[in-house]
Image (tube, rainbow, N blue to C red):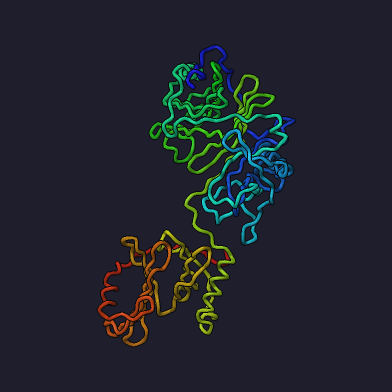
C-alpha cells in the first residue's frame, strides 16, 4: 500500500480546482445518493433543501445561485427517485432496494425541517424512503449508504475499499508528505493513510501546522488553517485543500468540537467511470455530516459537495399532539368527576430515570396534573398531582430512582406516595398515612406492611433534590 503512494515530483497534480457545489455533468442525471437515516425500518435519503423552488430576494441575493443549484440537484433526485434500485454493500456488492414514498410531515402533520439528521428514531427526517428487498425492517444499522441506479452501474464499475487499522492509521509516506509541504509551503503536523481503493488508489489526509497564509484571502483579519484530502495513484498525488480557522491560542479547527484535528472523510463507495474515478464520501464530524464525491478529472482532484447535514445530538424524546391527547384522556379517566374540570396547559420531561421516559403534564399553577412513563411505546399513568399532593424528587442512589408525592390529607394527617424506578420502569410503589408525624398505616406494592417496615423504607429514601423543569406550553 505504501508503494502505491510514493508521490515523486513526476505526475504531481496541478493546483486543485474546487467544485464544492452540486453542479452535475451534463450526462450525469442520476449520480450516487446517500441514505443516512432509517425511518420506520426503511432506508431514508434525507433531503437537504426546502421543497419549494427558492425565489431570489434581497436576503439571499448573494448566495442565491448556490441555493438554487442545490435545490435543483435535490429536485433532480426526486424526479428520478424510483430509478435508484441498488444499494452498494461492502464496496463491490449490491442489494436491491425499492422506492416506497416520501416523508414530508411529522406525526403532528407539520412540515419537517430539511438537512437534519436526528439521533432518535422517534424523530423523523424529511426525505425519500426505500425498502431493502428480502429483509425485515431495519432497526439501527445501515447495511450500506450509497444508492445508485442501474444505468449508473452500467457505466461505473464499483471498486473494493480496504480500510487500514481504524483509530491507528499509519502516516502517509514521507515522500508524499514532503511533496505536499513543498507544494503548499507549510510544514505537516500529522498525516494518515485511511484506505486503499481498487488495488490502485490510496486515500488519506495531511494537516499542516500553524496559520495558512493564503495569498488571495478576502478578509486580512481572517486566520486560516489548512488540511488536505489526498488521493494517490501510483506516483501521482492528487490533493484537495480544505480551509479551517486558526487561533493563536487554541490552534486550528475545521468542525465544532474537533479538538484541533482534521477528521478524514469516509469513502463509502468508489467507482471507475468513463470519465475517471469517483469516490463517494461522508465527512463525519461531531455535529455534522457532509456528503459528496471526489472526482479525478483532467489531472485534478475535484470535490463535488452535495450538502452539509446538521447532526442533532442529545435530543429529548418527542412528545406529539397525539401523546398530549392520550395523557389528557388517561388523566380524566383516573378520576372523571374531578379531573375533567382541570385544564392541562403545559408539559415537561422529568429525568427521574434516564433508562426510560417520564413526563409531567400540569395546569398552569402546577397544582393539578399527572406523571406518566412510556413503556414499549405506550404511555402509562404513574400518579396524579393534586392541590394538596406535591411532587418531589429524591436523588438517585445505587441504580434506584425516585418520585415522591406528599401533602396534607386533612387535619393532623399527612399522606405520602413513593415510586421507585429501575431500568426505566416503576418497580415499587410505597404508600403511607401519618398522623401527628407517626405512621398509622402503610403498604408496599399494594400489600400492607408493618409500621416499622414503613418507617425503615421512608428513612432509606434519599433526600430530595431540586430539578430543573423546562416547561413547554401545550398550545405551542
Residue 202 pos. (x, y %): 53, 24
Coordinates of residue 135 in the picture (x, y in percent): 61, 49
Q: Quadrant of the C terminus?
A: bottom right
Which residue, as the protein is rendered here, is positioned at the far bottom? Answer: 411
For the point 29% across and 73% down, the residue is 457
Residue in the foreground of this view, choosing between 160 and 229: 160
Find residue 413 and report its image quarter: bottom left
Residue drawn at x 45%, y 38% is 258
Seen in the picture, residue 282 relative to 140 is either above or below; the reply is: above
- Taking the image as shown, residue 166 lies to the left or right of residue 297, namely left
The vertical placement of 181 against 258, above or below, is above
Check the image and report above or below for 3 versus 463: above
The picture quadrant where one finds residue 320 is: bottom right
**Residue at the extreme top of the image, as rendered:** 10
Q: Whole-percent x and y of residue 454?
A: 29, 77
Task: Using the rendered image of the protein, determine whether residue 19 is visible from the camera's viewpoint.
Answer: no
Rendered location of residue 420, percent (x, y): 37, 68
Comparing 301 with 60, the one in front is 301
Q: Residue at x 48, y 24 (%)?
A: 213
Amino acid at each position: 500500500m505504501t508503494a502505491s503512494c510514493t508521490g515523486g515530483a513526476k505526475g504531481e497534480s496541478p493546483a486543485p480546482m474546487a467544485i464544492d457545489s452540486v453542479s452535475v455533468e451534463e450526462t450525469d442525471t442520476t449520480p450516487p445518493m446517500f441514505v443516512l437515516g432509517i425511518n420506520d425500518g426503511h432506508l431514508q435519503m434525507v433531503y437537504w433543501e426546502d421543497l419549494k423552488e427558492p425565489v431570489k430576494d434581497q436576503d439571499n441575493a448573494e448566495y442565491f445561485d448556490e441555493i438554487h443549484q442545490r435545490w435543483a440537484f435535490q429536485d433532480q433526485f426526486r424526479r428520478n427517485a424510483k430509478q435508484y434500485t441498488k444499494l452498494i454493500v461492502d464496496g463491490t456488492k449490491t442489494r436491491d432496494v425499492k422506492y416506497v414514498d416520501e416523508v414530508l410531515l411529522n406525526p403532528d402533520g407539520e412540515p419537517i425541517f430539511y438537512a437534519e439528521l436526528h439521533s432518535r428514531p422517534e424523530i423523523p427526517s424529511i426525505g425519500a424512503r426505500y425498502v431493502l428487498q428480502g429483509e425485515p425492517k431495519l432497526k439501527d444499522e445501515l447495511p450500506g449508504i450509497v444508492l445508485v441506479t442501474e444505468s449508473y452501474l452500467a457505466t461505473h464499475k464499483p471498486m473494493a475499499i480496504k480500510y487500514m487499522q481504524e483509530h491507528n492509521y499509519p502516516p502517509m509516506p514521507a515522500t508524499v508528505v514532503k511533496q505536499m509541504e513543498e507544494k503548499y509551503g507549510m510544514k505537516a503536523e500529522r498525516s494518515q493513510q485511511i484506505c486503499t481503493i481498487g488495488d490502485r488508489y490510496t486515500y488519506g489526509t495531511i494537516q499542516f501546522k500553524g496559520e495558512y497564509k493564503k495569498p488571495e484571502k478576502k478578509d486580512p483579519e481572517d486566520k486560516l488553517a489548512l488540511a488536505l484530502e489526498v488521493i494517490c495513484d501510483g506516483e501521482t498525488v492528487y490533493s484537495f485543500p480544505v480551509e479551517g480557522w486558526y487561533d493563536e491560542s487554541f490552534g486550528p479547527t475545521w468542525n465544532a468540537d474537533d479538538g484541533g484535528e482534521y477528521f478524514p472523510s469516509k469513502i463509502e463507495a468508489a467507482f471507475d467511470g468513463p470519465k475517471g474515478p469517483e469516490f463517494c464520501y461522508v465527512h463525519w464530524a461531531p455535529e455534522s455530516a457532509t456528503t459528496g464525491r471526489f472526482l479525478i478529472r483532467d489531472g485534478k482532484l475535484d470535490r463535488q459537495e452535495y450538502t452539509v447535514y446538521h447532526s442533532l445530538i442529545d435530543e429529548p424524546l418527542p412528545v406529539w399532539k397525539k401523546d398530549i391527547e392520550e395523557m389528557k384522556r388517561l388523566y380524566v379517566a383516573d378520576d372523571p368527576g374531578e379531573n375533567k374540570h382541570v385544564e392541562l396547559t403545559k408539559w415537561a420531561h422529568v429525568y427521574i430515570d434516564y433508562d426510560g421516559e417520564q413526563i409531567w403534564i400540569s395546569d398552569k399553577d402546577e397544582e393539578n396534573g399527572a406523571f406518566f412513563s412510556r413503556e414499549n411505546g405506550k404511555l402509562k399513568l404513574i400518579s396524579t398531582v393534586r392541590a394538596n399532593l406535591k411532587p418531589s424528587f429524591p436523588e438517585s442512589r445505587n441504580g434506584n430512582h425516585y418520585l415522591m408525592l406528599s401533602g396534607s390529607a386533612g387535619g393532623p394527617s399527612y399522606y405520602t406516595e413513593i415510586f421507585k424506578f429501575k431500568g426505566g420502569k416503576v418497580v415499587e410503589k410505597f404508600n403511607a398515612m401519618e398522623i401527628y408525624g407517626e405512621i398509622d398505616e402503610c403498604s408496599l406494592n399494594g400489600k400492607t406492611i408493618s409500621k416499622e417496615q414503613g418507617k425503615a423504607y421512608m428513612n432509606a429514601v434519599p433526600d430530595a433534590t431540586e430539578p430543573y423543569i423546562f416547561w413547554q406550553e401545550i398550545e405551542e
